[in-house]
Amino acid sequence: GNSVTQMEGPVTLSEEAFLTINCTYTATGYPSLFWYVQYPGEGLQLLLKATKADDKGSNKGFEATYRKETTSFHLEKGSVQVSDSAVYFCALSDLSQGGKLIFGQGTELSVKP
Amino acid sequence: GAVVSQHPSRVICKSGTSVKIECRSLDFQATTMFWYRQFPKKSLMLMATSNEGSKATYEQGVEKDKFLINHASLTLSTLTVTSAHPEDSSFYICSARLAEAKNIQYFGAGTRLSVL
């Protein structure tokens, strides 16, 4: 079945450091890929998405490229801020499976001043 | 656009009581809503898929008599935790999607349920 695997956290960085959170997926069809962010005590916010191979999603300085050849969708940001501290979830949605979202386990990011 | 409101944000109840959580799509019609449960420092677990005007589809291992879901209109779905017990304490999150964009879900802010 479909699945998503993320790098384990927590990830601790200093402000202005470069961020990479790895995400790989397994899917039988042609899924759409997402990154969601969850701030403490809140629900999930869609950060960015990509719907087909080679698409690049970007938002708020974050970006991720849908790589079909490596089945990956790694999240990157060139210079993190303290306000980026949150839990990040990689997810896929496969319409052939009813469009259910399948989440990775989440990666906690802590950015120190 | 695409705002989902979830209420209440936090509820504390006594063991044995029932609790209702509402999920509303404020500026769009949601033919499908989803209910998730999230344990501390864990990912989201899909509990059920709720389609307007029909019975919810529950994931394996989720008790349908324990977690009652009603989706009576295109903008409202409710989750009722019946006869709540301390083990039901958790963070419950709903999401909704538009009929024309089945691969995108918009999430509510979540409800923290604490059962004493």
Image: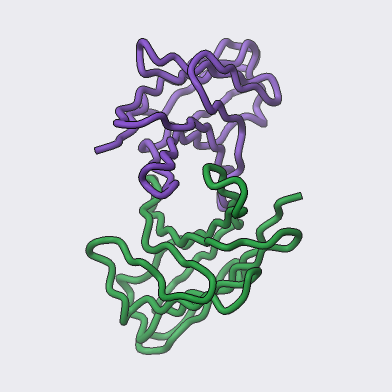
Chain colours: A purple, B green
| Quadrant location, the C terminus of chain B | bottom left
Q: Describe residue A86's horizontal placement relative to residue A103 as left or right.
A: right
Residue B62 pos. (x, y %):
28, 67
Residue A53 pos. (x, y %):
48, 17
Q: Describe residue B83's horizontal placement relative to residue B100 as left or right.
A: left
Q: Is residue A16 above or below residue B101?
A: above
Q: Is residue B78 visible?
A: yes
Which quarter of the figure has residue A86?
top right
Q: Is residue B116 above or below residue B58?
A: below
Residue drawn at point x = 42 percent, y = 62 percent: B49
Residue B55 pos. (x, y %):
41, 75
Q: Is residue B11 visible?
A: no
Which quarter of the figure has residue B31?
bottom right
Residue B3 pos. (x, y %):
71, 55
Q: Is residue B116 above or below residue A70?
A: below
| Viewer-nearest residue: A27 or A105 | A27
Residue drawn at point x = 60 percent, y = 56 percent: B109
Q: Is residue B25 above or below residue B39?
A: below
Residue drawn at point x = 60 percent, y = 57 percent: B108
Q: Describe residue B29's horizontal placement relative to residue B82 as left or right.
A: right
Residue drawn at point x = 62 percent, y = 61 percent: B30
Q: How many marks?
A: 0
| Viewer-nearest residue: A77 or A93 | A93
